Image: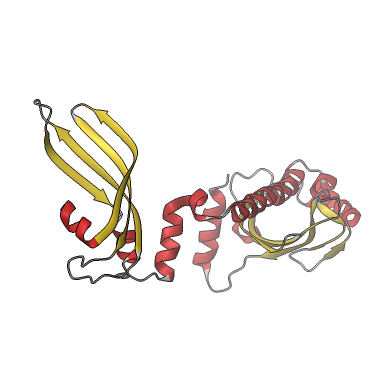
Amino acid sequence: MIRSEILRSAFSDLHYEELETIASRGKVISILNVTGKHTGNFFVIPPTGNDVHYKAVHIHRIGEDGKIVEHKAVRDDLTFMMQLGVIGPSPEYDMLFQAWKGFTQSHTPQQRASILYSNEEEAKIRSLYFQMIDGWNKGNGYLFASPFAEDGDLVGFDGTHLKGRQQIASFHQQLLDHYVKGSHLVGKIRDVRFLTPKVAIMHAVGGTIMEGQTDLEPERNSIHTLVLKKGDDDRWCIATFQNTRAQYIGRPEMTNELTTELRGEL
């Protein structure tokens, strides 16, 4: 523990502001804000003239006679040493510091508003993907196509290029009525990235359980790439959907990994 006289000789105007005190079962805990100016030698550190301000926690154990019998202190020594110039900041430290301090403390009000906006918009975007899947699972091609823009595009795994919400709806209704009737689609969104405030790209993976089956057919696993846009009415829609079969030629272990990942969504 650093003795009080050492601190006071090294830091003029040393001041302890009591922020909170808690007393319970023979212990007194004080949370303090410490400030001062480095104007004297602090061990081997010559005066820097720097202002210091850090938080400290002092824990006193009180004996039966009412006197202090034990004292412990915990300080923010990292901040303290950085303010003295002993430790310099680094990108790695800054990243860790921001994460450690948490969302509220590590962003300005403007940044927090921007992040909250992005989170809200991302939730809207994600809901469109699962609305599409829900339409498939209900055997309704028009519900499947409803998240698409009126002039949206869909490119199927076999290269079929559907243009416009109406064509997407009618084509999928035929599929759901005949070729994949009773099938169940499973999807998982891997990431959403905003290119602009009104354009986003989504990567997802999907698998299919065919009618009468209880497990995914690995050869039907797909990679989904979507471009979404926000219209003048402030509503998001799917502008483009690309469906690619996940064949992983010569890498069967990747097919197994994707199947296992999708099974986790069942």
Looking at the image, which residue is at 18% across and 44% down?
Answer: 72
Residue 90: quarter of image: bottom left
Rendered residue at 39%/69% (across/down) = 89
Against 99, residue 42 (above or below) is below
For the question of whether residue 59 can be seen, the reply is yes
Residue 1 visible in the shown view:
no
Q: Position of residue 82 (x, y in %)?
A: 34, 65
Residue at 23 percent across and 66 percent down: it is 40
Q: Quadrant of residue 81?
A: bottom left
Q: Is residue 167 left or right of residue 27?
A: right
Residue 100 lies, in percent from the top left, at: 41, 54
Where is the C terminus found, in terms of image quarters? top right
Task: Give the side of residue 130 with respect to residue 152, left or right.
Answer: left
Determine the residue located farthest toward the bottom in the rendered image: 250
In-front residue for pair 85/251: 85
In the rendering, at what x and y percent does residue 163 appear?
88, 62
Name, please, the residue furthest toward the front: 13
